[in-house]
Amino acid sequence: MKKYDVIVIGTGAGNIVTDAALDSGLKVAQIEKGKFGGTCLTRGCIPTKVMVTVADFIRENEKVKEIGIETEKVRVNWDTITERVWSKIDESKEILEEYKREENLDVYEGTGFFIKDKVLQVRYNKGGLSEEITADKIIIAAGARSRRIDNIEGAKEVGYITSEDFFGEKFPKKPYKSLIIIGGGAIGTEFAHFFSSLGTKVTLVQSRDRLIPRSDRAVSEQLGKMFSKFGVDLKFNSELKKVSLKNSKKSLIIKNKLSGIEEEIEAEEILVAAGVIPNSDLLELANTNIALDTSGWIRTNEFLETSVDGVYAIGDINGHGQLRHKANYEADIIVNNLFPAALPPGQVEEGKEPDRRFARFDIIPAVIYTYPQVAQVGLTEEEARKKAEEKNWDIKVGYNYYSSTAKGYALGYNEDEIDDGFIKVIIDVRSKKILGAHIIGKEASLLIQPYATMLTSGEIEHVIFEPEIGTELTKRMRTKKYSRYLDPQKVTSITESITAHPALTEVAMWTQYFVPMK
């Protein structure tokens, strides 16, 4: 059996941990079954943002006539879009080669799985098995994958694509003429925005009664109106019944769950964006004492500890949200708590040990890059009102519309028009604390950052997750009131603030990393 100091499974946010462990002089094993760089780089937030930015310019071109600019119809160069998308995805090859050159690092290209607690093997992509490996510290950052619909009659035989397929061998040679998108969450709505802007006839099939159901209802309803305006055919409360081939197209029969009426829709392709499932099944965790919830997500506490001492889980696989910046935030916590020698200069006061950091999963910003953009942090109004009695909150809600500001008017926003953006805040007037902020409109990804920074600075209460999971140190810390104070005027508060990825706020929030502190 080969012994390491640290094993990291996954090369998305897991790379932050790998780098810190290497910087600390430790012997590290890195395991990756797919392309290096993780979901975000190879099939998620980065290539999709390259695409939706094209769509944003198309929609802006349609709007500028309202402020006195006459333009011609936009023509899209699909080859340029394709080259820009794949230039980012292919950075994964460079990442792999860089890690292969690292000293003190063994790179395993394959699927890691557990033999027992803290003992793994790797099933190599090229065939064969590795020897057994172990480590004092194991960080699972193995991610999630798209939910498939093979259980629907005809789906597997006829075929469909997921985001993994799209950013793989099924990337289209030209835009689809028509497209059915199954799923109205972040992935589905971003694809709908992109392809509808190119002139694709898009039908979006959603099982719920609205788009982006995890967002505040007012924002969700506004986005639905905008999508309808742009010609996206929205099918809410829909149940999938059957997929078949018809007239050289793919046919989908759906049933409205309220009326019971069935409807047949056809398109050149079907894209499934119906959420994700954890990759925990690939890890063969039944051989361990690592606990899962009922949906297969790895259960972790606020210190990212699993039910096995020395094993941690970060990113999509722990079920606390499928966002790259949330995974980065968790990786930073792991580095702070396990590898303090790797922290950047100035992050820890000289001569002092760093505070032990904990995660707060309720104050993580999220952005959906539709048109208009959607951004949020904290509780929705519905969530806040459900907690009001327990928390002794007096909930008040405020709206401010883009059109009510001079800049909003200058941008072409007018009162009572369907595309007028707004910011909605939920406040407890007793404590004067902001409980949530929700935005729909131009540059929502930028406008959300002040709220995100406010919520992650000042006095940060220690909220306990999974109270039955914890090391002896964690249990001792929980017996006393434990909180952390982040001075909003100090650089450390910016370091620990979460900024949505990928957004231009990263330029402002990350600049402090380039200041020499010694």
Image (tube, rainbow, N blue to C red):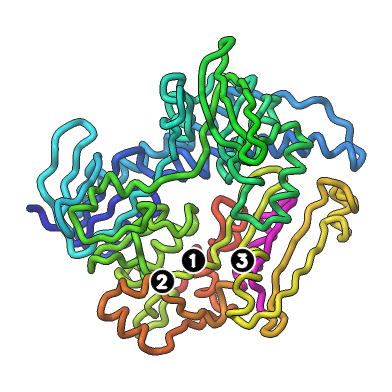
Q: Residue lying furthest front in this view?
A: 260
For the record, the magenta segment spans 433-454
Mark 2 Cα shell of 10 Å, populated few (<14), some (14-19), many (≥20): some
Residue 190 on image: x %, y %: 61, 40
Where does label 2 land, which residue?
Answer: 465
The residue depicted at 42 percent of the width and 53 percent of the height is 316
Q: Are marks 1 and 2 in contact (CB under 8 Å)?
A: yes
Quadrant in the rendering for residue 399: bottom right
User: How far apart, in angstroms, are the residues tagged by discs 2 and 3?
Assistant: 18 Å
Residue 508 on image: x %, y %: 60, 61
- In this rendering, is residue 69 above or below 463? above
Residue 405 magenta: no
Where does label 3 land, which residue?
Answer: 383
Res. 288 visible in picture: yes
Q: Is residue 249 left or right of residue 462?
A: right
Q: Amino acid at mark 1?
A: Phe
User: How far apart, in angstroms, are the residues tagged by discs 3 and 1?
Assistant: 14 Å
Q: Amino acid at mark 2?
A: Phe
Question: Disc 2 on helix, strand or loop?
Answer: loop
Where does label 1 land, which residue?
Answer: 361
Question: Disc 3 on helix, strand or loop?
Answer: helix
